[in-house]
């Protein structure tokens, strides 16, 4: 899966198992004013959040995985959306407000809770029509101040999104003190039944500044797969937060310019493409 692959409809890429785990690298590269890059092994969840399929499938995972219940590895609906509505209703509502008809499957790509702890810098909602065509992606971003913002990526006319299409959104939400709230993000997604890749690059007035990606091979959730995720990285989500602060310290020590936290945007959703 590379940026050179020919665009194709995402209709062939809709996975089947309602709960899947992905295992693969998380990469981050800063290009200026110093080059700073790191990569670490990660794991993520892909769940079908419309209907009850994921909740029902979680029962077979026993005590290892909990869907809206306590377990060593867990998913909590309240960690996403507005924390009040059913997840599919919330996502469809955002799409409807943007003039997009997303009346099919909705898949959520996110980090799991590990040992009760969760921090999710970014989660992706893949919203489809009933013909399985992808029509919107919602990038749900959380910062370390407990704030959340969503970037809704969709065609102006609500038509399907090609595989690998570059989609842009103006940056309006504070994430890192080492980046100003200006410029734009470029998103690209490649999905196959066995693999997922998300690329998010940040551009300021001088061009590309940050290059990031999350990718992994997908496996249907079984008790063995859940145990693999837990025993390989029991403190994974806690480690995400720790790595954020470690990398921030390194940038501070290198005297990369620091930006104070601005007021959050008035609108909860920013439309992009």
Image (spheres, helix red, strand yellow):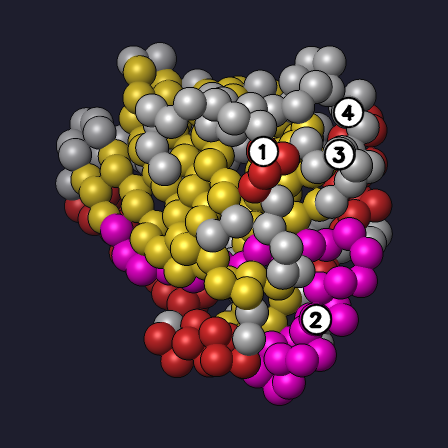
Q: Nearer the viewer, mark 1 or mark 4?
A: 1
Q: Nearer the viewer, residue 205 or 20?
A: 20
| Mark-to-mark CA distance, 2 and 1 | 24 Å
Label 2 packing within 10 angstroms: few (<14), some (14-19), many (20+): some
Write down the residue under mark 2: 57
Tell me, for residue 100, which label it has, or none.
4
Write down the residue under mark 3: 131
Range of magenta residues: 39-67
Q: Earlier in the sequence, mark 4 or mark 2?
A: 2
Tell me, for residue 44, which label it has, or none.
none
Label 1 packing within 10 angstroms: few (<14), some (14-19), many (20+): many
x and y percent of residue 112 in the render? Answer: 54, 64
Q: Nearer the viewer, residue 172 or 196?
A: 196
Write down the residue under mark 1: 10
Whether residue 62 is in magenta: the answer is yes
| Mark-to-mark CA distance, 1 and 3 | 11 Å
Indicate the quadrant containing the C terminus: top left, top right, bottom left or bottom right.
top right
Left or right, residue 44 beside residue 40: right
Query: Can residue 143 be spotted in the picture?
Result: no
């Amino acid at each position: 899966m590379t940026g050179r692959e020919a665009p194709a409809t995402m209709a062939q890429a809709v996975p089947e198992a309602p709960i899947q785990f992905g295992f693969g690298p998380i990469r981050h590269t800063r290009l200026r004013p110093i080059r700073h890059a790191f990569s670490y092994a990660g794991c993520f969840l892909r769940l079908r959040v419309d209907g009850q399929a994921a909740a029902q499938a979680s029962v077979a995972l026993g005590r290892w995985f909990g869907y809206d219940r306590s377990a060593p590895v867990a998913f909590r609906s309240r960690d996403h959306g507005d924390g009040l509505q059913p997840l599919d209703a919330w996502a469809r509502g955002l799409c409807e407000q943007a003039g997009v008809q997303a009346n099919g499957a909705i898949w959520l790509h996110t980090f799991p809770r590990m040992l009760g702890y969760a921090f999710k810098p970014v989660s992706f909602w893949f919203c489809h029509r009933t013909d399985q065509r992808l029509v919107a992606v919602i990038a749900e971003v959380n910062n370390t101040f407990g704030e959340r913002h969503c970037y809704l990526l969709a065609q102006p006319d609500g038509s399907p999104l090609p595989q690998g299409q570059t989609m842009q959104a103006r940056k309006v939400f504070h994430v890192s003190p080492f980046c100003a709230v200006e410029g734009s993000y470029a998103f690209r997604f490649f999905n196959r039944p066995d693999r997922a890749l998300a690329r998010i690059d940040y551009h300021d007035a001088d061009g590309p500044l940050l290059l990031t990606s999350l990718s992994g091979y997908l496996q249907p959730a079984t008790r063995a797969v859940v145990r693999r995720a837990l025993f390989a990285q029991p403190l994974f989500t806690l480690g995400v937060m720790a790595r954020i602060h470690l990398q921030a310290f390194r940038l501070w020590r290198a005297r990369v310019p620091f930006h104070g936290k601005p007021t959050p945007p008035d609108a909860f959703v920013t439309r992009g493409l």
